Amino acid sequence: MKWLLILMAVFALTASAADVTGTWKGTAETPNGTIERTFVFKVDGDKLTGDTTSEMMGKSTITDGKIDGDNLTFTIKVNFQGNEMTLNYKGQVSGDTIKFNVHIPDSDQTVEYNAKKVS
């Protein structure tokens, strides 16, 4: 009986993890206007991989991606006006929406993205 309870608890924790696999479209409001970005996520256990694309900064590969329940984190490298920058994403999933805080260490700025699942 004890093992059954443990298995049920493990299944409940696994089942409660957000399913972010698929394509998401996000927007951020900045002093320079609205920035759009498409995210394509793949999940394997607690590992998050995929890529992301924006008109302004091109395509980037997701690295160091992790998902824990409704929280996800990952890093991308972008080329902006000839400069390579690292962007650190932290997001929280709520249904078909993810709210991201994106930290840009090189300039110590933070940008907020709201993304919606499209497929």
Image (cartoon, helix red, strand yellow):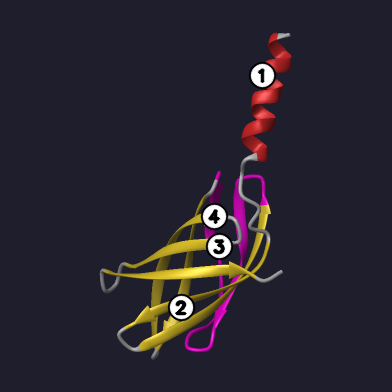
Q: Along the horizontal axis of the image, is 46 left or right of 89?
A: right
- Check if residue 64 falls in the magenta segment: yes
The nearer-to-camera label among 1 and 2 is 1
Amino acid at circle 3: Thr
Q: Could you tell me which secondary element the residue under label 1 belongs to?
A: helix
Depth check, front residue: 37 or 93:
93
Classify residue 29 by image quadrant.
Answer: bottom left
Dot 3 corresponds to which residue? 97
- Percent position (x, y) of residue 57? 48, 85
- Percent position (x, y) of residue 48? 60, 55
Q: Is residue 67 above or below residue 82?
A: above
Dominant SS of magenta comes to strand
Q: Along the horizontal axis of the image, is 5 left or right of 116?
A: right
Classify residue 42 by image quadrant.
Answer: bottom right
Mark 2 crowd level (few <14, some 14–19, many ≥20, 10 Å Cα): many
Residue at 53%, 88% in the rendered image: 55
Mark 4 crowd level (few <14, some 14–19, many ≥20, 10 Å Cα): few
Amino acid at circle 4: Ser
Q: Could you tell me which secondary element the residue under label 2 belongs to?
A: strand
The answer to which of marks 1 and 3 sits earlier in the sequence is 1
The reply to whether discs 3 and 4 touch (Cβ–Cβ < 8 Å) is yes
Residue at 67%, 39% in the rendered image: 15
Residue at 62%, 60% in the rendered image: 49
Amino acid at circle 1: Ile
Dot 1 corresponds to which residue? 6
The residues tagged by marks 1 and 2 sit, at their Cα atoms, a distance apart of 43 Å
Amino acid at circle 2: Val
Q: Could you tell me which secondary element the residue under label 4 belongs to?
A: strand
Q: Is residue 75 above or below residue 58?
A: above
Residue 94, which numbered label?
4
The residues tagged by marks 1 and 3 sit, at their Cα atoms, a distance apart of 31 Å
